[in-house]
Image (tube, helix red, strand yellow):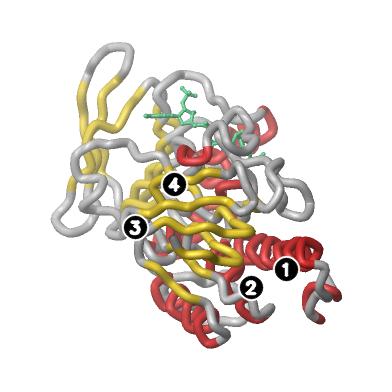
Amino acid sequence: MSEEKVIIIGSGPAGLTAALYAARANLSPLVITGNELGGQVSITNEVENYPGFPEGLTGPELVERFQKQAEKFGARFEFDEVVEVDFSGPPHTVRTHGQTYTAHAVIIATGASPKRLDVPGERELTGHGVSYCATCDGFFFRDKEVIVVGGGDSAVEEGLFLTKFARRVRIVHRRDQLRAGPLLQQRAFNNPKIEFIWNTVVTAIEGNGRVERVRVRNTVTGEEGTLETDGVFIYIGHYPNSTLFKGLVEMDDHGYIIVDTFMRTNVPGVFAAGEVADPIYRQVVTSAGDGCKAAMQVEKYLAQQESRPVSQDAAGG
Ligand code: NAP
């Protein structure tokens, strides 16, 4: 059993920024990375909206920089997956495949994952025309044809965003009515670049190394067909990676962890940051900001527990 001051679960922008701030506060944080160092951003072709990098950089490059910076100040990384937690402390217990730890504070930064269609071709063509992030990848579809799958706020909002680049955006929805709010609907219906394909599901995504077409089926008539396209943006919802914490910390109906302004969950010593606690913004910069806030609050929390003074960073915040 290894004893830690603070364990950060997850290594996306929230976790890595929390690691940087906790390391600079001399807390020697341990980051348990999960399966994929960097989380969702590590599968993004190009990040062009993270401030400070006007020429853009790839997701993996950004993750490497985050990690390097955190390590420079003493953050430690364990490339393992958390399989069980016990928050009946503090100290709390975190168990991975290889080790059991106790921690006086835990920051949950496990992120969210876009729901997948689970159709043939989707996985192979992700990053080659299949995308879950118009903000990240829309730019690459200038004057091209794209399909957006979904009928909620995200699909319609991102479809509208894509009209800045694409010559035509076809929104493929499984029903004949949108779930999106009326204002967004109106804007989409009024946009000459947007077309709707109703009562239709995508059954396969095809192309030779890049998306070329999707196979579709009409949900009413059963009729099958093909739509030629350069890109497929899938917006059928996200799910927070919070299953591990169910019943242990308070969550909303969708499984997002509920935090207060100080990134505190309802359990003393357990904080959450980034997309696992954010159903709205889902940006690298907002997750990084959450991670910063969580680490600064952890420092305050631990100082209160130990009755010791806080660092300049946390005192200023
Ligand atoms: P959502 O509201 O859950 O909508 C998901 C959409 O995908 C629905 O239209 C659903 O169809 C469709 N869908 C689900 N599974 C599917 C499948 N397997 N195949 C085909 N279609 C499928 O998700 P969201 O749009 O990401 O929004 C999530 C939350 O964030 C919502 O509360 C939303 O209001 C909020 N949000 C708000 C804004 C805004 O206010 N500007 C922007 C984005 C998101 P059905 O309609 O038939 O169920």
Q: Nearer the viewer, residue 211 or 293?
A: 293
Ligand 1 closer than 8 Å to label 2 CB: no
Q: Are marks 1 and 2 in contact (CB under 8 Å)?
A: yes
Q: How far apart are marks 2 and 4 (CA)?
A: 25 Å
Q: In this view, does 314 lie above or below 194?
A: below
Marker disc for residue 113: 4
Q: Position of residue 276 (x, y in %)?
A: 56, 47
Q: Spatial distance from mark 1 to mark 4, Cα to Cα?
A: 29 Å
Between circles 4 and 3, the one closer to the viewer is 3
How busy is the neighbourhood of tag 2: few (under 14 within 10 Å), some, or many (20 plus)?
A: many
Separation (CA) of disc 3 from disc 2:
22 Å
Which of the marked residues, 1 or 2, is nearer the chain's N terminus?
Answer: 2
Closer to viewer: mark 3 or mark 2: 2
Q: Mark 1 points at which residue?
A: 299
Tell me which amino acid carries mark 3.
Asn
**In the depicted structure, whether residue 68 falls above or below residue 170:** below
**What's the mark number on residue 249?**
none
Label 3: state its secondary structure.
loop
Tell me the element at label 2. Answer: helix
State whether label 4 is within 8 Å of ligand 1.
Answer: no
Amino acid type, label 4: Ser
Q: What residue type is labelled 2?
A: Ala
Residues at circles 4 and 3 in contact by the CB criterion of under 8 Å: no
Of labels 3 and 2, earlier in sequence is 2
Q: How far apart are marks 1 and 2 (CA)?
A: 7 Å
On screen, residue 198 versus residue 273, left or right, reads left
Viewer-closest of 118 and 174: 118
Q: Which of the 4 image quadrants contains residue 234?
A: top left
